[in-house]
């Protein structure tokens, strides 16, 4: 039996990421998705290439986020066919979208750190009371 190509899911995931990002950049027609700024942050593909989870970052309010995710879910079957054609897959993976909280969490941590940093420390790295 030939060795399995363990990199294939990674290659397919990258292809899915690029195709979904291209679609979101210009071809998406759903107004719920167009109204929000949607960015693809990553894609996980199962080893059997049957399912792809696309992680997205969505700027805006909670209501905008929910509406954009609903819009993305409604375009998933169209995207599945598009990905299958673009990547020349016999069976394209089923696509689902998940909100990626890491970007929002990183921004929140950044603001918290900025509010904690003392403003009166000199730039040379030594404490101000030395």
Image: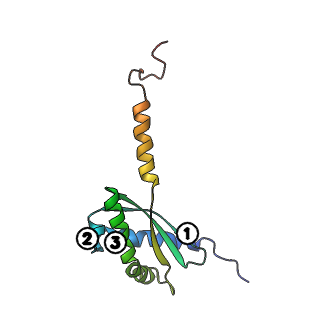
Q: Is residue 28 left or right of residue 5?
A: left
Discs 1/3, front: 3
Res. 71 mark: 3
Q: Residues within 10 Å of mark 1 (few under 14, many from 20)?
A: some
Res. 59 mark: none
Mark 1 vs mark 3, CA separation in Å: 26 Å
Mark 3 vs mark 2, CA separation in Å: 8 Å
Residue at image position (45%, 47%) is: 106
Comparing 92 with 33, the one in front is 33
In x, y percent, where is residue 43? 49, 67
Mark 3 or mark 2: name the one nearer the start of the chain: 2
Comparing 2 with 19, the one in front is 19
Which residue is label 2 attached to?
Answer: 31
| Residue, far bottom | 90
In the displayed structure, would residue 19 be above or below residue 88?
above
> Which quadrant is the N terminus positioned in?
bottom right
| Residue, far right | 1
Residue at image position (30%, 73%) is: 28
Q: Residues within 10 Å of mark 2 (few under 14, many from 20)?
A: few
Residue at image position (42%, 25%) is: 118
In the displayed structure, would residue 129 be above or below residue 8?
above
In x, y percent, where is residue 120? 39, 20
Comparing 18 with 71, the one in front is 71
Which residue is label 1 attached to?
Answer: 10
Mark 1 or mark 3: name the one nearer the start of the chain: 1
């Amino acid at each position: 039996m030939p060795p399995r190509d363990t990199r294939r899911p990674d290659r397919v995931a990258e292809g899915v990421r690029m195709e979904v990002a291209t679609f979101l950049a210009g071809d998406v027609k759903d107004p719920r998705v167009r109204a929000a700024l949607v960015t693809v942050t990553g894609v996980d593909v199962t080893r059997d290439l049957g399912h792809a989870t696309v992680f997205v970052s969505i700027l805006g309010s909670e209501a905008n986020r929910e509406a954009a995710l609903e819009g993305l879910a409604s375009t998933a079957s169209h995207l599945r066919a598009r990905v299958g054609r673009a990547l020349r897959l016999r069976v394209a993976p089923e696509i689902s979208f998940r909100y990626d909280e890491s970007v929002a969490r990183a921004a929140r941590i950044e603001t918290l750190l900025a509010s904690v940093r003392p403003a009166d420390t000199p730039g040379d790295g030594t404490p101000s009371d030395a």
